[in-house]
Each structure stands twice: as C-alpha cells, then as structure tokens.
Image: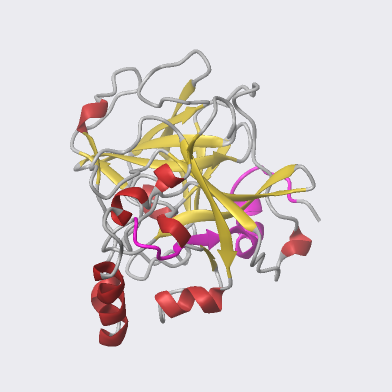
Amino acid sequence: MKFSLLALFALACAVMAADDIDWSKVRPMTRMPQYWRRLPKDLLKQYLTEVRNMPAGARDNARIVNGYVAQPGQFPYQVAILSTFPTGSGLCGGSVLTANYVLTAAHCVDVSNGGLVIYGAQDRTVNEPSQQRIAFEQSGVRLHPNWNPALIRYDIATIRVVSPVTFSDRIQPVTLPRLSDVGNDFAGLIGTVSGFGRFSDSIQEASAILRYVNNPIQTNLACSVRFPGVVQPENICLSGDSGRGACQGDSGGPLTIVRDGTTVQLGVVSFGLALGCELNWPSVFARTTSFLAWIGENSDVQLLP
C-alpha cells in the first residue's frame, strides 16, 4: 500500500447504496494537488535517477505485497468508508474511535453528501457475517477548521454514524495517544499501516482484502528531505523502505504502533508521492498527537492523560 503524492483517495464513478454496492465501479484516483510538480529541479533529478537505477523487477516487488494480507480480525479498528459526492462515490479508510464516531482524513469527506461505514471487514466486497454497515450523513461530518485542501494541511475529520456500532471480536475502538505523548516524535519505532487501497502501481483497482505493512517511523526532518516545504509539525511520516507504505484508497486509515500490548494510533493517512506508490518515498500522515484536543471536542472519545 503505497501512495502517490496526491492524497490516497479512491473515487468511484457511480453513487453507491448501502445494500447494493457496485464495487466494479470503485476506481482509485486522486483529488489532491500534485506536489511533485513543485519539487525543486535537483530533487526531481535525484528522484528520476533513483527510478532509472532501480533493479529490474524492483517496482513490481516493492509495494504492499511486500507487506501482508491481514488475518480476519487482526485490525478490528479498521473501517472502509464509502462517501457519496456529486460526481460519484469514493473509497477511503478510517478507524473506530467509539461506537458513534470514526476518525478519517478531511480530504475523504470534505465535499461528501454522506455515505457508509463498513466495520469488521476482511473482504470489503462481500457482506460478511462479521460486518456491520452503518450510514452517515453530511451533518455528521466534522472537518478540522484549518483544513487546507490546496496544501493538504490539517487533514483530519471525524464522522458520526447514524446509529452506534455494536462491538465484537472483529470490531473494536483504537486507542489514541495519551495527552502526555504530545511532543513525542515516535521516530525509530515500527509503525503499521492498514487499508484496502491499491497494492501496486500497475493495478488500478483498490484491494478487496485488508492488507498491512510495517516500516520505521521517520523524523520529520528526514521526511522533509523528500518533501521540502510540505511536511509540517502536524504530520508524521513512515519510511518508504522497500517500497512499503500507503496508496490510493488508503486515505484516512490508521498508522499505529503497539505499546505495552496496546495498539495506539499515531497518524491518519494523508498523502504521498504523485509519481508512484512503490518508489521508496515516505508516506505522510496527520499526526494524532497534534489533534487530540480537537478529536476530543468533535467526538465522544475519552482522552487519556
């Protein structure tokens, strides 16, 4: 699951219905500005040199398939979000905050008319017994007031579903960082990204099956070398080593670590390199520790001290 330096958002061609989703019309595509066109010429030259020097077959092997197919119930906090728009419907990821709320990226829902949250899915295209599918309305979408789609900043949102989900062994809330974690960059820890997004630059469709990858979390300084002037303190980055990361369709999904046996969400998938998802560039996320107070005010989650 890697992404392009557009947001990792999958847009479909037709409006979906809760009980009649034509998944064949869900196509990953992006809505966000192509930052790579504004990268300095020397950085673009470096990037293109790296691509030319990649070993034969490397681009086919360096992607989320370098990660894993998730086991059923492995990520009980993961959701798939189908948003309706005037031009069609879109696929994003998200995470369970509480029975009433999910957390996602602002660019997934900023012009949404509402949609559907799919909980407990291993295969999002099949209405599995483990799944619960609950609608949300436009009035239930809360965007960060500083969300800037032109710069992909403050890319975070909460969604209130129309009725609470019932927790099960396949559906559980994620744990947010503690308030005392504010200021911790978490660099060097192994982060996990999960989602239903594309798993190859050569495959246009999003994955039907939930997948995940593990890679080290970077310092923002190291990430800024790849994205100069783009990465902000409110972002957190995952290394793109071995071509692993997020891709279109993974937007809004969780970046997590395991701490003391508990899964903690550190980020929300936001953007990556526009030239491809398999090219060893970092994945960039909204940093949840930068938004804890806002998340608490725009959901019913209880923050930890």
Q: Is 292 displayed left or right of 222 in the figure?
A: right
Q: Is 186 displayed left or right of 94 in the figure?
A: right
Q: Nearer the viewer, residue 281 or 237?
A: 281
- The question of residue 300 being in magenta is answered with yes
For the rendered model, the colour scheme is secondary structure
The answer to whether residue 190 shows anywhere in this view is yes
Q: Nearer the viewer, residue 305 or 287?
A: 287
* Location of residue 86 in the rendering, given as x and y in whole percent from the top left corner: 21, 42
Q: Is 272 displayed left or right of 202 in the figure?
A: right
Residue that appears at 36% across and 55% down = 3
- The question of residue 135 being in magenta is answered with no
Residue that appears at 25% across and 74% down = 48
Q: Nearer the viewer, residue 82 or 73?
A: 73
* Location of residue 46 in the rendering, given as x and y in whole percent from the top left corner: 31, 80
Task: Classify residue 290 by image quadrant.
Answer: bottom right
* Location of residue 158 in the rendering, given as x and y in whole percent from the top left corner: 52, 47
Task: Classify residue 270 by image quadrant.
Answer: bottom left
Residue that appears at 75% across and 56% down = 178
The answer to whether residue 155 shows anywhere in this view is no
In this picture, which residue range is highlighted in magenta? 278-303
Determine the residue located farthest toward the front in the rendered image: 56
* Location of residue 261 in the rendering, given as x and y in whole percent from the top left corner: 77, 42
Q: Is residue 227 above or below residue 300?
A: below
